[in-house]
Image (spheres, rainbow, N blue to C red):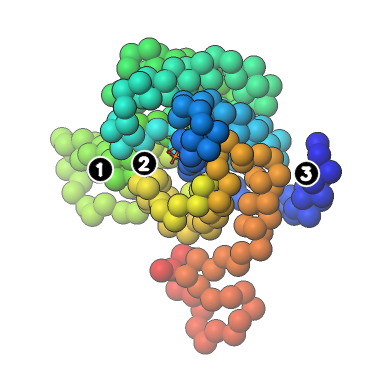
Amino acid sequence: MTAEESRLLEKLDLARLPRHVAVIMDGNGRWAQKRHLPRIAGHRAGTKSARTTIETCARLKIEALTLYAFSVENWRRPKVEIDFLMQLLREYLRKEMPLLQKNNIRMRFLGRIEELPAGVQNDVRGAMEKTAGNKGMVLCVALNYGGRAEIVDAMNAILAERNGHGAQDKVTEAQLSSHLYTDGLPDPDLLIRTSGEMRVSNFLLWQIAYAEIFVTETLWPDFNRARLLESLLEFQKRERRYGGIREGEPSEEKPVRAAGH
Ligand code: FPP
């Protein structure tokens, strides 16, 4: 560990870490461009940042980490880049399996997995099966993921369940949550986006309702352990109110519900 990393780690309150960290890994193309390299070199360099982030979060005992690897919109990219990203993911799953097992990480994939090429589907299922018994951090890879698609899929799953059943009550927030790809996971407390873009880009639209958003100018391949620790420290500086008022502030009435608007 570098001197900078241990200085940052010392400042971190390990009892107040986010339960779920979500990351929009952006800027691989720009990182490569700056070095006069092809875009795919940026993606390859990005896998190193993914490795560091995964390992560090697992060691910090963060419950869940979600990485946005491929969106439903990413099919608009050139075919060679798409093919490369799919191959990179397959290679990553094969090479990183020992690291995942060593850190007791359970893998999940969020998205329309059934639309992916057969080989990718196969590896994705394999990774889930191999890590199914692990009890440590849940690592979610958002793959062929779209936030709107996820909500539509959840509604269709609810409708499919109701077909043939009498109950036609209104859909509740809890019911919708339990049909999202993230069923059973806490909502992200911290959303990190690299490379400076101030956008949510169709990522976890439902789940980030109360997430703290941290945007850094750092490009994803440069996002190292020190930058991750900095974002966790920034999270700990934020005051989280969930639509209520500051703790200790006098209020005339008792809150009527736990989470407001
Ligand atoms: C965004 O950079 C990055 C992606 C669309 C792909 C993310 C994939 C990786 C980091 C590698 C694989 C990760 C895992 C977990 C196996 P961009 O191409 O949009 O960059 P730009 O905005 O600078 O063009």
Q: On the image, numbered disc 2 is attached to which residue?
A: 180
User: Mark 1 to mark 2: distance in Å?
Assistant: 9 Å
For marks 1 and 2, the one nearer the N-term is 1
Say which amino acid is labelled 2: Leu
Looking at the image, residue 87 lies above or below residue 66 = above
User: Mark 2 to mark 3: distance in Å?
Assistant: 36 Å
> Which mark is nearer the camera, 3 or 1?
3
Say which amino acid is labelled 3: Glu
- The answer to whether one can see residue 20 in this image is no
Of 27 and 207, nearer the camera is 27
Graded by Cα atoms within 10 Å as few (under 14), some (14 to 19) or many (20 or more), the crowding at tag 2 reads many
Horizontal side, residue 172 vs residue 98: left or right: left
> In what element is the residue under mark 3?
helix
> Which mark is nearer the camera, 2 or 3?
3
> Quadrant of residue 130 in the image?
top right
> In what element is the residue under mark 2?
loop
Say which amino acid is labelled 1: Val
Q: Residue furthest bottom?
A: 252
Residue at x 25%, y 43% (from the top left corner): 152
Q: On the image, numbered disc 1 is attached to which residue?
A: 152
- The quadrant of the picture occupied by the N terminus is top right
Q: Position of residue 224 (x, y in %)?
A: 66, 39
Residue at x 55%, y 43% (from the top left corner): 219
C-beta proximity under 8 Å, tags 3 and 1: no
Name the disc covering residue 131, or none. none
